[in-house]
Every structure is written in structure tokens, then in C-alpha cells.
Image: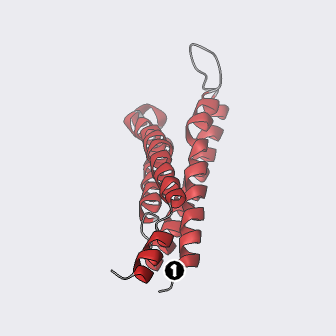
Amino acid sequence: MSKKTTKNLAERRSPLMTACKSIALLLSLWFSGAMTALSGAGLIYNGESYGAELKNTGIFLIISSVLMVSGAFLCLFRKKLPNILSILLAVSGLVLCLVMLSRLTDHADLSGWTDKYTLLPVSDMYMRRILPSIAPCVLTAAIAAVQLKRCKK
């Protein structure tokens, strides 16, 4: 390998970018993947008592979770197409997630759902679980945008 190739390789493999990608993927797996998908799974599991509307909300929460995690995974690559798809998937998954969160919290507040131990509204619990998924999606989009700027083909 020539010195020029080695120098270009070192410039492309920034430790800061590697750390950001690792953090984005881990946060995405936890907040976007686990919290959002498990909230959706709980709505589907209890769909008989909640009704079809909340069961569909649970399905869409799981779909949004898959979109956000897929976007985070695609930002690991340095090619142009995966980075474009990363931004599209992460942002569309986040928008779908926030719309479903709004529907869910509105229904919970109108129905008067509260936690039986603390008597706090259940909508607050859903907000605390799902809203942190904004951070990995923003980080994913930022990483993909930086990589798109650096892409040559």
C-alpha cells in the first residue's frame, strides 16, 4: 500500500466518527428498538381490551422502531446510497413514531389511564419511554449527512 493510500485511509477512519457511530447504534437499539418496539408489543398483546385502534398503533410503533434501527445500521457504511437511505429511514421512522405516540397519549389522557402505584398519568410513562428515541435518530441523520458530504461517488 502506498503512503498516499494509507494517509487517505487514516483520514477516513476517524476515531470520533467511529465513536459516534457506536453510540448512535447502541442508543438506537435501546431507545428506538427496545423501548418503542416493546411499547408497541404491549399494545398488541393487550389489544383485545384496548381495541383495534390501539392495536394498530402498536403495529405502527413496531414498524417505526424497525425503520429507525435500520437507519442507524445503514449509517455505519460510508457509501452514498446507504447514507441517503439512512437519513430517509431514520427520519420517517421518527415521524411515524411521534405521530403514534401522540395518538397513544391522547387516548390515554382521554381514557384517564393512570399508574396504579404512583397515580401518574400513563401518558407520561409513554413519553418518558419513547421520546428519547429522538436523540439517536438525530445523531444518525447527522452522521449520515457528514458522510454524504465526504462521499465522492
Residue 94, image quadrant: bottom right
User: Furthest residue to the top?
Assistant: 117
Residue 92 x/y as whole percent: 54, 63
Label 1 SS? loop
Instruction: Give the residue type that dot 1 points to.
Output: Cys
> Which percent across, then down, holds residue 64?
48, 54
Can the viewer see residue 37 in this picture? yes
Q: Where is residue 10 drawn, in percent x and y?
A: 46, 70
Q: Residue furthest bottom?
A: 153
Task: Please provide percent x and percent y for residue 83.
Answer: 49, 71
Residue at 60% x, 28% y is 122
Look at 37% across and 82% down and name the residue there.
2
How many numbered discs, if any?
Answer: 1
Q: Which image quarter: residue 105? A: top right
**Above or below, comparing residue 73 to residue 37 in the picture:** below
Left or right of 140? Residue 22 is left
Q: Residue furthest front?
A: 3
Write the residue at 64% across / 16% down: 119
Residue that label 1 marks: 151
Image quarter in which the N terminus is found: bottom left
Q: Residue at x 60, y 26 (%)?
A: 113
| The furthest residue to the left | 1
Residue 56 visible, this orientation:
no
User: Residue 102 or 70: which is nearer the viewer?
Assistant: 70
Residues packed near mark 1 inside 10 Å, few (<14), some (14 to 19) or many (20 plus): few
Residue 151 vs residue 141, the one in the foreground: 151
